[in-house]
Amino acid sequence: MFNLISRNLSFSAFKATPVHILFPRSLCSSTAASDNSFTVSYLIDSCGFPPDKAISASKFLKFKTPDRADSVIAFFKNQGFTETQISNLVRKFPTALHYHPEKNLLPKFEFLGSIGLSHSDIFKLFTGRPNLLGRSLKNHIEPTYNILRDLLQSNNRTAIAIRRCAWVLDLNFHANMFANMQILLDVGVPGSKMLYLLTHQPRDFLAPTDQFKKAVEEVVEMSFDPSKITFVLAVHALRSMSKSTWEKKMETYEKWGWSKAQILLAFRINPWCMMMSEEKIDKVMEFLVNKMGFETSIVSKNFAIFSLSMEKRIIPRSMVYQYCLDNGLLKDKKICGFSWWLQCSDNIFIKRLERYEKEAPGVLKLYQEKLDHCN
């Protein structure tokens, strides 16, 4: 995989698609809007364009009959797109109305299906990144996929990366990706850990190299071990927020009595604690401290709780925990036991409640009620 980084690859196939391909000359027009009156009317009446947007789009689109555009809209409907979704897609990428459904669009849908993406995945891919419809299948999409697959060494991991970030198929990702991978290799990050980041957070590798390098250097200064997964997670955390956002999250924790040292320790052990929103941090602390009665200093040592869903885990399981405590099923209230109570798998949790059911009939029903209520 990593031989690709140093290998002299020819990226001629990945050069940005020329404007004359995305907007064919046959479609471009410098004539007055009146000459494009049919196109403007079609975009307004059939695609829901606001008049000003329709006039703007008509500079790149020109057709005298609705046949081709109608066939494109019919194609998207057959693929399961709603009228609203088609309208949004065409507004973002009006040139799609020029394409031949069978020659230009269908092959892309078929290729993406052949690499392991579901119909739902493909649907999300094009609604989220409609410009991908304008990329050449042979000259861009397929070669880009092949390089990704060679790097990730797995069709499944490659599909996950594409689901996580459609940009990896649309943009010329190689411009920064190989340089950023080399930066991680230079500080001692193992290939397996880099694979994890590339699979689950591929957008990080699209960052400008100077910005990526700065994030890596900050993580090194925080004494993260590059051989551990927490190193690349910390890089992702720093890459995913601005300095001001980082400071706001620090202030939110400090508001609840955490020291800077406690926050940084928590970040080194579990970087996800700084990827929660300020609102989520407040909600968890409010619930655990004011509702459940745990000390802030104790909560700060069990920061893995912050990555759990309030509605699906923390609230319903906490209510059942308190019920079991009140009924003498638990000896005393300890955060370590409580943390396990929240983090164990659904299967293990249900088995624990089944054990308690003999002494406190209805505990399983109570849990389901709390779960249903929160969801």
Image (cartoon, rainbow, N blue to C red):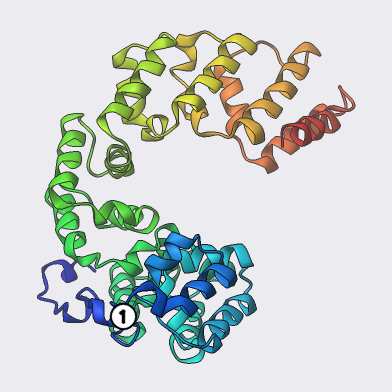
Q: Which residue is mark 1?
A: 28
The residue drawn where x is 32% and y is 54% is 203
Residue 43 to residue 253: above or below? below
Residue 159 to residue 366: above or below? below
Quadrant containing the N terminus in the rendered view:
bottom left
Residue 56 to residue 288: above or below? below
Q: Nearer the viewer, residue 348 or 252?
A: 252
Q: Residue furthest bottom?
A: 103
Q: Is residue 130 visible?
A: yes
Q: Is 253 placed left or right of 209 in the picture?
A: right
Quadrant containing the C terminus in the rendered view:
top right
Q: Return the x and y of residue 40 as percentages of the image width and height.
A: 47, 72
Q: Is 342 placed left or right of 240 in the picture?
A: right
Q: Return the x and y of residue 222 as percentages of the image width and height.
A: 20, 29
Q: Nearer the viewer, residue 182 or 54?
A: 54
Q: Amino acid at mark 1?
A: Cys
The residue drawn where x is 19% and y is 75% is 15
